[in-house]
Amino acid sequence: MASEAALRGAGRLTDVPGLRVGHAQDPEGITGCTVVLCEGGFTAAGDVRGGGPGTRETDLLHPDVLVQEAHAVLLGGGSAFGLAAAEGVMAHLRDRGVGIDTHVARVPIVPAAVMFDLPIGRSDAYPTPAMGREAAEEAATDFEEGSVGAGMGATVGKFAGLELATKSGVGTASVRVGDLVVEALAAVNAYGQVVDEDGSVLAGARSSGGGWLDVREVLRASPPEARPIENTSLAVVGTNARLTKAQVKRVAMMAQDGLARSIFPMHTLFDGDSVFALASGQVEAEPSIVGAWAADAVAEAVRRAVLLAEGAGGIPALRELRGS
């Protein structure tokens, strides 16, 4: 499969100089968080499409507000409880003198978004400020993918119920065109199924007879009762392009196409899908081209999230189902 071939040298979010990624997780509670640190601050914007988002500081990412940059982005599980992990990231950055200079203190800008992963682990387990700090302290250019960090409790194919879902996780991929680098990291916890480049199901709701349930057939025959709190896929896009905040916003919007190309259905009332975009400003590039490559990187990052995941909480992963 194309996605399996891409596992060999797909690149990673930290291919852009200045970006580092760290994870922290609770294996017993089956939850965690992932932090993207932006050295020196990156021009930042975001785009929220899902109908049930859990976010923090996203208003600061609008092009018409004062703040232009972010110093970190947090992705996490735990639903709204998990947003508290951003406090630990802020503390880590504050202790290092990182943040917007307000003349009386430096205030780190840390946008965040969370997914609902409580059903797979303990319902009282969620990312804490201590976990946010740990992830920030562990951030590096080399980092793990699969069932780690924000992907610890992630699953896909919940349109037929959690008992038939497949374990997911965190994935990353990048695109290089000359000096331009565009990459993405995705934490995939979808109501829908993950599809490969040819449209075939890569991971989703498992059929009792083997293989996958067809989400279109399920929704036509007997639409299941979906609970809006049990999903959400999140992504961070990074680039070394020199872009204005409004242009970075356009990149985030275009990157949502990568989620839609790799997950079906997408942007439902039952998901809180959010994409953050970060630009370091090192290379001249046309914003629409950056956005097009961002969509490609996000789509492949989503597929890697399920290809590299490990089973947990009684939910098997794709590699287990394949016997590999």
Image (cartoon, rainbow, N blue to C red):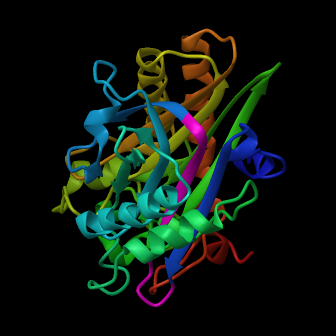
Q: Is residue 109 above or below residue 291?
A: below
Q: Is residue 134 visible?
A: yes
Considering the whole magenta stretch, tell me its main secondary structure: strand
Q: How many marks?
A: 0
Q: Is residue 285 left or right of residue 59?
A: right
Q: Residue 69 or 239: which is nearer the viewer?
A: 69
Report x, y in % for residue 117. 35, 71
Q: Is residue 304 visible?
A: no
Report x, y in % for residue 57. 29, 44
Q: Residue 141 or 201: which is nearer the viewer?
A: 141
Q: Is residue 77 above or below residue 109?
A: below
| Quadrant into which the C terminus falls | bottom right
Examine the structure image and report whether residue 39 is included in the region drawn in magenta.
yes
Identify the residue at horizontal 31%, vertical 62% (top origin).
83
Q: Is residue 106 left or right of residue 3?
A: left
Q: Is residue 295 above or below residue 287?
A: below
Q: Is residue 218 left or right of residue 7?
A: left
Name the quadrant containing residue 199: top right
Report x, y in % for residue 196. 60, 44
Report x, y in % for residue 96. 56, 57
The boundaries of the magenta stretch are: 27-41
Q: Is residue 145 left or right of residue 273?
A: right
Identify the residue at horizontal 55%, vertical 16% (top origin).
243
Q: Residue 37 or 11: which is nearer the viewer?
A: 37
Q: Is residue 301 above or below residue 82?
A: above
